[in-house]
Image (cartoon, rainbow, N blue to C red):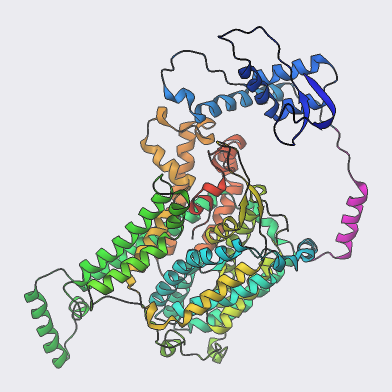
Amino acid sequence: MLRLSAPTVMPEILDGEIPLRFVVVILGPGQPDVSYHEVGRSIATLMTNMEFNAVAYEANIREELICGVDNFLADSVVIPPGDIDSKRLLSGDEIRKALKKRQNRRKVIEEENPSPPKSEQKNHGDIKKHFEKRKKCRFFNGMINDFEKRFPYYWSDYRDALNFQCLTSVVFMFCASFAPAITFGGLLGKYTNEKIGILETLMAQCICGVLWGVFAVQPLMIMSATGPVLVFEVSLYAFCTNLNIDFLTVRLYAGLWVLLISIIAVALDGSRMLRYVTRFTEDIFASLISVIFIAESVRFLYQTFIHNPVASFQFYQHIRQKCEIDGINGKRNDSQMMAICDGEPNTALLTTFIMISTFALAYGLRQLRQSYYLGRTLRRALGDFGVLIAIAVVASLAHLFVPDPYLQRLEVPDHFSFTNIEARRHGLFVSAYLPLNQLWVIMVALVAALLVFILLFVETEITELLLSRKDRCLVKGNGFHWDLLLMGACTLLCSIFGLPWMCAAAVQSLAHCGSLSVPKKTAPGERPGVDYVLEQRVTTIGVSLLMGLFAFGGSYLRLPLASLFGVFLYLGVMNLIGVQFVQRIILFFIPEKYFPDIPYTQSVDIRRMHLYTTIQIICLIIIYAVKYFKRTALAFPFILMLFILFRQIFLKKIFTEKELKALDGDDESNPENGWLEKDFFEDAPLPV
């Protein structure tokens, strides 16, 4: 084995102009049963190992090379020759399991015989500058650092958009964002008596998205309506209705308070509090939103059957006659009879068919994405656009084959305007006027602002954290502090115009980053990775403008409400994918010998693991009960914050640090594919 002092091109040995640094000469007698090419392949495999490669470049004597080979063989998994009884012996999971056992054994040995830590040289000049800087500006340190890192790249954010992949990203992200927007907007209109509806949602996403694309430090984040904020707004509307106060006015003052709270949080570097939000709370949060989505979908179907019983024509004829007589005599006192006076015999079954068909088609296309049918590009496209395809196909079929069905549809005006001006009772700007006997509403708005800020903070900061991971390959910096302040400003702007509150959507933001990622050129069988990401602002602005353009759709947006609840049901199921809490609930019903090889099944006793899961189930029941009752529904973000304190204070006394690291730490599993191959519902810890 020869190591050259400088890389040299040897066209006589290797085709192509590739510089060589190592030359291995293998000599031996010619024998028919010996292939020296296999020896060459073994040496090539040896050189691809990072540790041996470093040894080969720096070795000065023969013994160092031999030691490097010994270390390589010690880490190798050897499969003996002969027949293999089980295919599992050749699986990657079994090999990774064997390697992990070796690593754990080494850790135990290192803990028993700790080596003295290596002294690290510190750059005292940089530390001195850092402390001098903190003395000059005690507040807003994080925001200033965000600006200093990102501002030099600002104009390149527009130049880097001159790439065809950015155009395809705009189309992809519009399709990925439009379906959740019309779903949440339509349902928000239903639950708020059309005070805020689908048109307001599209315009809010347009305005906030453009502002975010222009001014944000991390412009790849997508501002959108999200499930947790939707649930809070519905709870706030019910709360305001019970107190007989104006919903939009309360939101206006709440928006002012949210901006003030955001300024205080940014001034004190409040983003550091994010480290206390762990998987324990994230799993309960995601499960709560999923349970609410699924329960509301079932409740909608149940109410449809109550108001439109499946009965014969004679039954409805009798009901109509009785309703007419009672209407003339003014005796409509029976609430159940009043509910079905306007019912139709085919509505319930047709609603069920549309809702289940939308869910089944969206879920089937998502499963197609994970299969081997069709080409990779086609099945990924069908899976990514599955929700939009499901809504379009089911709504079109309902319109074609049932020309005039009695279905609940979205209330959308024919021209560009607010969804329902009469129900809104405000002009373009929400009035801040309050009677003297209702000035206490300002303090109610403060409580609402504190609660919604918890949701906005968690969703925005965790989305920033997901995008800042090393495997995303983003190099232009992140904006944990400035973006939080910008989120508060967008909240106030939406409150002034009476638009729904927007925040960073984790699923859409990860999809946006994935659509702009340029993959590495990898060898067959190698895990796909990211070479670089087209970090720019134009795609975010383009997607937002398209969302606003479709607000002029008018009557074309009058989709069946059953189809939107089908999407609601789909999102509820998809939010549970990848939630460790749900996976551990399933382990209650699986024998221990069939448990998967994951950290919390290997490092934690089964009883302790089930105890931890039971605590989470109790917490989920508590927060759902708080959300279920109208008088307490507004407080569910506060209960979520109490769970964070419970995790940091009480769980540390019940479980050891090792158990909490396995149950509540980052996912250390090593999947076959990188995050580019994952479904974005699986990759995001937060609900849609």
Work out whether residue 126 can be spotted.
yes
Q: What percent of the width, then of the height, locates residue 628?
A: 40, 64
> Closer to the camera, 522 or 187?
522
On screen, residue 551 versus residue 264, left or right, reads left
Point out the stretch of residues depicted in magenta.
119-139
Give above or below for 469 relative to 428: above
Work out whether residue 75 can be spotted.
no
Q: What percent of the width, then of the height, locates residue 503?
A: 57, 68
Give above or below for 665 relative to 499: above
On screen, residue 681 versus residue 21, left or right, reads left
Asked if the stretch drawn in magenta spans residue 129, the answer is: yes
On screen, residue 34 versus residue 389, left or right, reads right
Asked if the stretch drawn in magenta spans residue 210, the answer is: no
Q: Main secondary structure of the magenta part?
A: helix
The residue located at (41%, 45%) in the rendering is 371
Q: In which quarter of the image is the N terminus?
A: top right
Q: Quadrant of residue 358?
A: bottom left
- Residue furthest left as drawn: 314
The residue located at (20%, 75%) in the rendering is 336
> Closer to the camera, 461 or 200?
200
On screen, residue 287 versus residue 111, left or right, reads left
Q: What percent of the width, then of the height, locates residue 290?
A: 42, 57
> Closer to the camera, 477 or 436?
477
Q: What percent of the width, then of the height, locates residue 450?
A: 59, 69
Give above or below for 189 relative to 523: below
> Closer to the camera, 214 or 244?
214
The residue located at (53%, 81%) in the rendering is 250
